[in-house]
Image: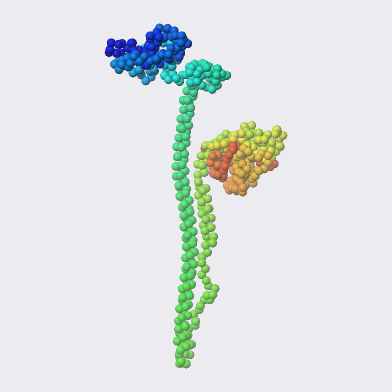
Amino acid sequence: MACANTSWSEENFSCSICLDVFSSPVTTACGHNFCRTCITKFWDEQVQYKCPFCNKLFNTRPDLQVNTFLSELAAQFRTTVRVKEQPCVEPAEVPCDVCTGTEQKAVKSCLMCFTSYCQTHLEPHQRVAGLQKHRLVEPMDRLEDLMCKKHERLLELFCQTEQVCVCLLCTVTDHKSHPVVPLKEEYEVKTAQLGKIEAEVPQKIQERKQKIKEIKDTVELSNKDADREIAHSGQVFTALIGCVEKGRDEFNQTVIEKLKSTVKRAEDLIKELEQEIEDLTNRSSEVKRLSHTEDHLHFLQTFRSLKEPPPTRDWTMVEVRPPSYVGTLRRSLDQLEETLNMEMKKLPDDAELKRVQKYEVDVTLDPDTAHPSLILSEDGKQVHDGGVVKILLDNPKRFTTYLFVLTRQSFSSGRFYFEVQVKDKTKWWLGVARESIDRTGGTGWTPETGYWTLVYDKDVLVFNDNPSVRLPLRAELQKVGVFVDYDEGLVSFYDVEDRVHIYSATGCTFTEPLYPILFPSSDKEGRNSAPLIISPVNQTD
């Protein structure tokens, strides 16, 4: 506190409630002085009106007026006091709400006065009987936040229904029917939950870091794959461009040779014609000269010596026709196509197959979808026609007309690959189908109806489409690989044994789960009795 360098001490000008120099001092009938604000607030909290200093009771609440004389003296005292150097409140400490000038550290907070007090200003709460009943707690900042805005009471309960802090009056008004618990009890519950969350957070962080690593690894691998593909495609396209340029040059040379031949023939004919013209002109001149001779003897002698007319060609049927290029370009393009096909066969399908085999999935056949005449192995990997239609319970998932069966597993995103052994089969279908396909009848089995299937029948291999795509069959197929990129809309088929690409359906639109689908076809009196077998992928083949 401050001290005066006058004959008056600070105690003569201090309010006994706030212990600070008077502010608008008033005097009670018993002669004691207080700050007007302090005594007003004190009486607001009391049932009886008494002097906080001597405890004298008043029948009615006194109407106090500011003591102007004491107020002026207090003002003069403020101008003459010298504030002693005192340490400032540390940032983490709560300041006293009463101190003027340099603030002191609060040692207690009063939940009745909504005020924090230093040791000096806390003295009335320790001395005055009425103030001793106030609830003191450890210093707290922003005391107004601890109070109910509606009832101005301490928030000391927690409403579990609305998850908010409430005061005691709230429990009998707005939250009357809600379960409430003390703040400490809810604090312990929430602390336990927080501990669990706190324990989960590092794991979630680690999972996300791992996912970031996976994504970065994928990007790095994609960059390497892209560089490799660009380098390889550069070589392939360079070779193809060379083929195209060679075809173009050969075509141009053919046209030029035809033109040269036509020009030479024309030149030869013109030369021959010019020679005949020259011969005829000479004879014409000789005849003309003889015709002007009047000497009969000379005329007759000369006439006998006239040479026979030079042989001439009948030019009426002779003509020079422009060279025909009909079919030349097509023959060149056909030859170019054949060359391109040969180059395409040189592409490393083996590398492509290895890449898609990395997306192998383990699938098993679903007996609930199998046609009643089909027989499935216990492990769900093989299927063949049993020749007898079994009587089974109705199941909306089951195919009832054609010998189809789906796998248990479906796929709605990403990429997947599986292989099916078709060895010793004379007819089979396999591929993928969407979930909503018609299972009771024939629907065309094309992509439009939800089927993307490869079909083998009587040494003919086709992709079911509208119209069907007939495919070359180089040798008897032993095992077929099926690769699907759901997001890219791609279905590809591979000859696993020869490690070559068979066919790809591109630009597909998938909007629902896809199931691998198998069709072993009928037994055909034992000629097609071999099963279709879902086989594990062996990338070292």
- Residue 52 vertical placement versus 297 (above, below): above
Instruction: Locate residue 72, reporting x and y percent.
Output: 33, 16
Viewer-closest of 50 and 391: 50
Residue 178 in view (yes/no): yes
Residue at 46% in and 9% down:
59
x, y percent for residue 279: 46, 79
Task: Report if residue 74 is visible in the image.
Answer: no
Q: Is residue 135 above or below residue 487?
A: above
**Along the viewing direction, whichever of 414 and 533 lies nearer the viewer:** 414
Please determine whether, in this image, residue 480 is positioned above or below residue 193. Answer: below
> Where residue 343 sits: x, y (%)?
50, 49
The front one of 284 and 155 is 155
Percent position (x, y) of residue 242?
46, 52
What colour scheme has been applied to the protein in the rendered image?
Answer: rainbow
Image position of 500 with respect to 94: above or below: below
What residue is shown at x 66% (from left), y 35% (from top)? 397
